[in-house]
Structures are given as structure tokens and as C-alpha cells.
Amino acid sequence: MPNHDRFECQTAIDSDAILQYFTQGMNSSTLISVMIRQQISGDGMQEHIDYQIEKYQFRARNESPRLMRQWEDVMRECHDTGAGARERLRIALLNVDYVTSFELPFRLLLTRTPQMIDSVRREWQLSQKKVVFNERQRGCVYSLQNDLSGVPDSFSYSLATRIRRADSYGMTTRCFTDIAGQVKAPTARLKLALESGLIVTALDGLFWLGIQRIAADVQRLRQSGMTIITRDVEVSDSLTGTTRVVSGYSL
């Protein structure tokens, strides 16, 4: 029995393709994948992906009211000023007692956090402390303050979201939520997304695939034999209120 809901992954499907799907029994995921690839290769236009953030709650367990207020002020200033990625990091460092390497990508939608931290170090003297996230991942705390003795040694984070992802061909949120429900390993999720014909960005990695540094996972898949194309993709999101060009990955 065909799964009609799968057509949400691609809205620009013509009547001939639908007829072929029902008469020949083509798997809907395969049909979507083929048509997305045909349209991307056929029109040559730059892809645009818009992320409408309807709900976005990123929290550290036992986060103090002071830190919560600081982050609320930071996000308000970043959105109101349309701050770019580097400026968002600077605003956070200036206004929050300390930031962690784990939270920066999620709170500020930074896709190149290590490189940005290195860049800021050339201007400011940052204090640093090694910590553990969610009981297994190692990382660092950064601060303009000298004394980090009051900073915890470990952090536990949670993320609750409701995000609408729309690209040049329609609403594609369902594609990623389906993938996240089918597969648990982040790299396997990325592989399935690529094989489904999707263009994947670092924001997709953060929101649905469980990936903070997508370039590393792309490199692992390339080493395993996958031919992955990198292209420029224009993205916009309502959390930061900005539009910028990022790397998009596809087959």
C-alpha cells in the first residue's frame, strides 16, 4: 500500500509521475529522490532553504536564572541587530558569564565554532576549562573572566524544537523527521538523507541528524566510497533573523 504522506517531501511532483508511481508500484522514497535530483540538476538555480523556528528550547540542566536571563538578552540582541555568526559569538562572550563549546552551535546556530573561537582568541584573551557534556562528550568552557573555579565540571543539555524546513521545491521537514525516527546513528542519518536526494546543511545536522560538525561526517562518508558534492546554499532562519550562504551536501 503506498504511503501517501511521503509525498510531503516533494511538492513539485507532476501528474505523470504520480500516475507512474501508482501504476508501477515505485517506492515513494525512490520517486522523491529521483525527482529531486532531476530538478536540482535541471534548473541550475541556487538552492534556498528557509527554517521557520516555531519552538526552540535549548537548556542546561540546573541552569541558573542569571545564565537564563543572560542568554535571553543575547538572543534578543542578535536577532534585533541581524548579527552575523562571528558577531553573535562576540555578543555572547561579552554578555554571558561563560559559554560552552557544546551549546554555541545550538544557541547561536554556529556551524564553524572551533574556527570562530580561534579567530576571537587573536583579539581577546579567553579563559578555558575542559568539561564533559551529557556524560560522554568532552569539550571546553570559554570566558572573558579569569576565574573559572565556579564553573561546573560537567553539563547536561536538552533540546526541544518544532521547525518548518522549506526549500525551493516545497516543505521538506517530514523527510528529516522520518529519517531521525528510522535511524539512530548520526552518520547513518546523514547517509540516508543524502541517498534520499536531499541537500543537507549544517543546520539540518543540528536540528535533526544529531551532528554538530557535519564536515567531519561528510569526510567519513567520502572515505567509505560515497561521492558527495559540496555546493553553496542560501539559508535563512527566524531564530537569528539572518540570511547567509553555507555549504550544502548532496549526491
Image (cartoon, grey):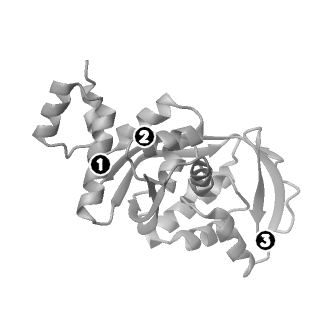
Q: Secondary structure at mark 3?
A: loop
Q: Position of residue 63 (x, y in %)?
A: 69, 45
Measured Cα–Cα span from mark 2 to mark 1? 15 Å
Say above or below: 60 vs 109: above
Between 26 and 210, the residue placed more toward the observer is 26
Secondary structure under tag 2 reads helix
Q: Secondary structure at mark 1?
A: helix
Q: Which mark is residue 237?
A: none
Residue 97 in view, yes or no = yes
Amino acid carrying label 3: it is Leu
**Spot occupied by residue 16 in the image (x, y as percentages of width and height):** 11, 39
Residue 176, numbered circle: 2
User: Residue 36 — which label?
Assistant: 1
Residue 149 versus residue 193 in the image, above or below: below
Q: Residue at x 19, y 46 (%)?
A: 12
Residue that appears at 14% across and 43% down: 14
Q: Residue at x 33, y 34 (%)?
A: 29
Most distant residue in the front direction: 225
**Is 205 on the left-hand or right-hand side of 115?**
left
**Decide: marks 2, 1 in contact (CB < 8 A)?**
no
The nearer-to-camera label among 2 and 1 is 1
Q: Position of residue 13 (x, y in %)?
A: 19, 43
- Counting other residues with Cα less than 10 Å from the Cα at mark 1, is it few (<14), some (14-19), or many (20 or more)? many
What is the quadrant of residue 25 in the picture? top left
Q: What's the amino acid at mark 1?
A: Ile
Q: Give the residue number, with chain letter if any, for mark 3.
A: 126
Mark nearer the N terminus (2 vs 3): 3
Q: Amino acid at mark 2?
A: Phe
